[in-house]
Amino acid sequence: MNRSVRRFLPLGVALAIALAYIIDTRAATTIVAPGADLQAAINAAQPGDTLLLEPGATYTGNFVLPVKTGGAPITITTAPHPNHPAAGQRVSPAHASSLARIRSGNPMPALTTAAGTHGWRIVLVEFGANRDGYGEIIQIGDASSAQNTLAKVPYDIEFDRVYIHGDPVMGQKRGIALNGSAVTIRNSYISDIKGVGMDTQAICGWNGPGPFVIENNYLEAAGENVMFGGSDPSIPDLVTQDIVIRGNHLTRPMSWKNDIIPAPSGLVAQAQAGGTLPAGVHTYQVVARMRVSNGVTARSAASAPVTAPVAAGGRVALSWTPVANATAYDVYARSPFGVNQYWSVTTASFVDTGAAGQAGTAPTSSGSVWTVKNLLELKNARNVLIERNVLENHWAGAQPGWAIVFTPRNQDGKCSWCVVEDVTFRQNLVRNTSGGINILGYDDLAPSRQTNRIRITQNLFTGITPTLGGHGWFLLMGNGPRDITVDHNTIDADGTTVMYVYGGTSGGILPVPGFIFTNNAARHASYGINGADASFGNGVIAAYFGDGSVQGNWLQGGSASRYPVGNYTDGTFASAFANVSAGDYSAAPGGPLAGRATDGTNIGADVPALAAALRNVLSGATTTQLSAPTNLRVVSK
């Protein structure tokens, strides 16, 4: 810039022009062609640079984000394409053809971070499954003892409109391992994260301090859609904190409740001459097998049995309809003398000539299913805001069926400081689940700190039902948490109990200090507010919540004499709402909820406000994001 011009410009304008000049001359855009060395391009990029990948191209490797010196982020993105979602709009599988794809060619992650790296943006990129669904697709930070200080934690990393998915047939253990700091995951889509006999998560972190923003994403996983904790951190005294989980759709297909592999059908057994089988009736069944993520083998239920009368010295030719995605079959036989054995084959046919197989009996249980635990779990987290999410489709599987779990866990016995505290769960819709929320005061297996300051307010729970295998209760609490507030929630559940509380691991009463249960609307059912070692209603309230408050609740169908004055039981459930059959849980004008809350408003959630807050969560059309500042000033001193 010419000195004579610069001298007469106001300081702020001069600085802006100077900054623009620096950016223009230093920042570069590099096109990385298919087949080019993407890692070399990443290594060569400088702060402020952009790496453009080709739409539809695949870049295979195990790429590492190295440490750079400088403040401006480096962006890795797909070159512009008319099919790309706009800023603030969630990406989806429909956009895949216009995205560049990064994938691992082996079981290792496709993308990892060097210790202490910072300043990276990954935008409009697809990440495919690792080979055989092993590990995580993206690894932010290091979960091992190698990351044992905060200085080694990667930070200032953003994922925006990123499509991450496991294999639709085999699944994937984890989408993103989130062990960094100042990481944002926004407008993204993570799907087909599922496994058998193991935990799987769309997003999981346990060795990073936070803060994290997880906003406007579709998150689909079998084990836990989002989890913090679950393994002891290697950084001493670390509690992941300052987490925002906002505007996400946490779900899984209901089809994942079914057997992964259908039982073989069309089994035909034809007796023939030319073998060594003994005379008599031989019985056969077939089981299909396939490999799923992390090298696990899943199986089907056994087919319907078929029999074949065989003459001495005969054999039996078997065939069946091939099962989609099956990689092998076990053919089980029972001889006329009760001898059970089986053979493994890779095609949908087999001939039992009389040669010996392996000893074994056809399974009588159902086939393998994806391992399901919960939708959202906190095991070691502080200062967490969970708002304006839709959480749905959960059933009792590998755990009793609670959709949301706030339970401190000293998982490996080395995290006595692990805690869940300062959590706000508000304006969420939880639907079609076998249970609501489970809160544990202390880890019941190893030392931990006490769960405290949990606030659950202005949420709608619908379709909470034991038909999905759990209790169908809204809330379970035990082992002495403290300062729990449950206020202005609407609950449509058909279990026997609204809330159940129990004591410590050795039994007996262990109070929940500072418990507030106000302005909630629910069916009372058989037991309403219930607990261990005390009678439901006033007995439980006096035993566990002596210094708390249970006021302004509508427990429809219960006995008013069992609850403190200021709670209500009148009317029918349908009469309290605008149109339950149509899914409208707004308080009916003049109904039993109208104006009866302790704050003078309606009992239950403010459903119109909730509907407005959730309007775009399923579509992912828009999201609440921080805007760029408009009042920036540069002050010279």
Image: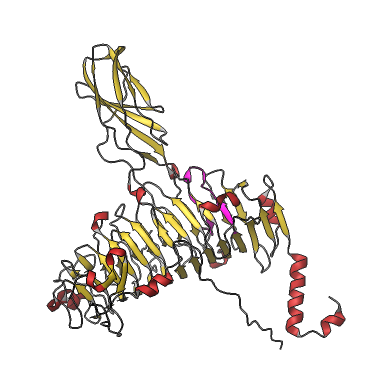
Taking the image as shown, residue 563 lies to the left or right of residue 288, namely: left
Report the side of 307 relative to 156 (left or right): left
Residue 291 visible in the current orientation: yes
Q: Is residue 133 magenta?
A: yes
Q: Tell me where residue 212 appears, x and y as whole percent.
A: 50, 67
Whether residue 204 sits left or right of residue 581 in the image: it is right
Q: Work out whether 71 lies above or below 123.
A: below
**Residue 391 lies in quadrant:** bottom left
In terms of depth relative to the viewer, which is nearer, 320 or 620?
Answer: 620
Residue found 37% across the figure and 46% down from its top: 196
The foreground one among 397 and 606 is: 606
How many discs appear?
0
Q: Which residues are magenta?
A: 123-143
How is colour applied across the structure in the image?
secondary structure
Q: Residue 337 at x, y = what percent? A: 19, 21
- Near-viewer residue (475 or 343): 475
Can you say whether 455 is above or below 87 in the image?
below
In percent of the image, x 31 and y 13: which residue is there? 275
Quadrant (top left/top right/bottom left/bottom right) for the N terminus? bottom right
Q: How far from the left and from the top, in percent, is residue 19?
A: 74, 74
The quarter holding residue 70 reads bottom right
Q: Is residue 146 left or right of residue 562?
A: right
The answer to if 101 sits in the magenta stretch is no
**In the rendered view of the protein, which quadrant contains the C terminus?**
bottom right
Q: Residue 611: x, y in percent? A: 39, 70
Quarter of image, res 513: bottom left
Vertical comparison of 199 with 407: above or below: above
Q: Is residue 180 visible?
A: no
In front here: 612 or 176? 612
